[in-house]
Amino acid sequence: MGRKHSNRAYGFEIKEAAVKNAIRVFREIAEQINGRKVVMIFDYDGTLSEIRKSPEEAVMQPDTQALLYNFTKMCGYKIIILSGRARNNVKKMVGLNGITYIGNHGFDALGDIRVPALSRAYMKLLSAILRDLKKNLKHINGIRIEAKKYSVSFHYRNVARGSENKAADAFRNITGPYVKAKKINILKGKKVLEVMPPIKWGKGETVKQIVKSNRGAENPAFMYFGDDVTDENAFQALKGKGFSFFVGNSARTKADYFLRSPKEVNKFLRKLLYYVRCE
């Protein structure tokens, strides 16, 4: 057991210990949020759905969709999907109303999230980089170049084994000068490299705004579920303010707990749905 200290401002205890499986300590978590308002934030790929060869194939299981739907109907629960996908794309994949959708790692948001303004120069450069990538990397079998509203994703999951590094190097040869000039940032995920705005903004900053805009007098419990390195800043942003869950088997995470797979996320949500009641 780890050493505990209380955080009265947010109404739960923080444990300074190794990351635990959230299923095994479910009651410990549930007892701290029972009767409270709850804001649940989810990544999509690898968290609510399994990672597939192409983004279109990463379909959420119907029972997971049903669980999310049930949470939207529960008093005191708010559901947010915070994804690297374009906002309209992830909304289509989830297919539910009553959920707040945020895309592009926080750059594509509506409502209370105040996203930094992006310059015309950046948007023009992004279009030029997209053209260069498509023109100069089209010979690499298995790549996928995805244009999103505020970013460009370079997927190399389907590149032949042994050629992944060459594909990533080809991408960096084109984008490297712009990174050096601080005109873009590159975000690295699971078999994907993303051209992003040169601004300190992402899931961590977005989660901070979510906490700020939802905290209020009711002092809700915040929960974040994610599987990728792009979620680590969100885990860090919730330290001392909520509960974070890494989806996967990695021990190198800033999250408070872990769940082994989207199937375990489903199992955790099912237990939570039947255990927790709001007042």
Image: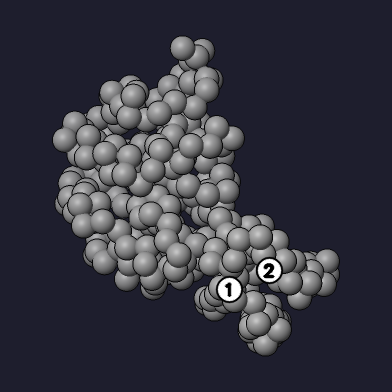
Q: Residue at x 30, y 58 (%)?
A: 60
**Residue 229 visible in rendering:** yes
Nearest the viewer among 278 and 146 is: 146
The image position of residue 52, as x and y in percent, is 42, 61
Report the label total.
2
Name above or below for residue 198 compared with residue 18.
Answer: below
Name the residue beneath numbered marker 1: 143
The answer to which of marks 2 and 1 sits earlier in the sequence is 1
Q: Nearest the camera: 47 or 149?
A: 47
* Amino acid at dot 2: Ala
Above or below, 80 against 18 in this view is below
Please name the residue shown 34% across and 24% down the image: 24
Residue 3 image position (x, y, % from top left) = 51, 12
* Marks 2 & 1, CB-CB < 8 Å contact: yes
Looking at the picture, how far across and down is residue 222, in whole percent?
39, 40
Q: Nearer the viewer, residue 160 or 55?
A: 160
- Where disc 2 sits, the SS reads helix
Residue, x 58% and y 68% (percent of image)? Answer: 159
The dot on residue 22 is none
Q: Tell whether 166 sits left or right of 147.
A: right
Amino acid type shown at disc 1: Ile
Q: Quadrant of residue 216?
A: top left
How many neighbours does mark 1 have within 10 angstroms: few (below 14), some (14-19), or many (20 or more)? many
Q: Residues within 10 Å of mark 2 (few under 14, many from 20)?
A: many
Q: Residue at x 19, y 31 (%)?
A: 275
- Quadrant location, the C terminus: top left
Examine the image and state in which quarter residue 37 appears: top left
SS at mark 1 in the image: loop
Residue named by callout 2? 167
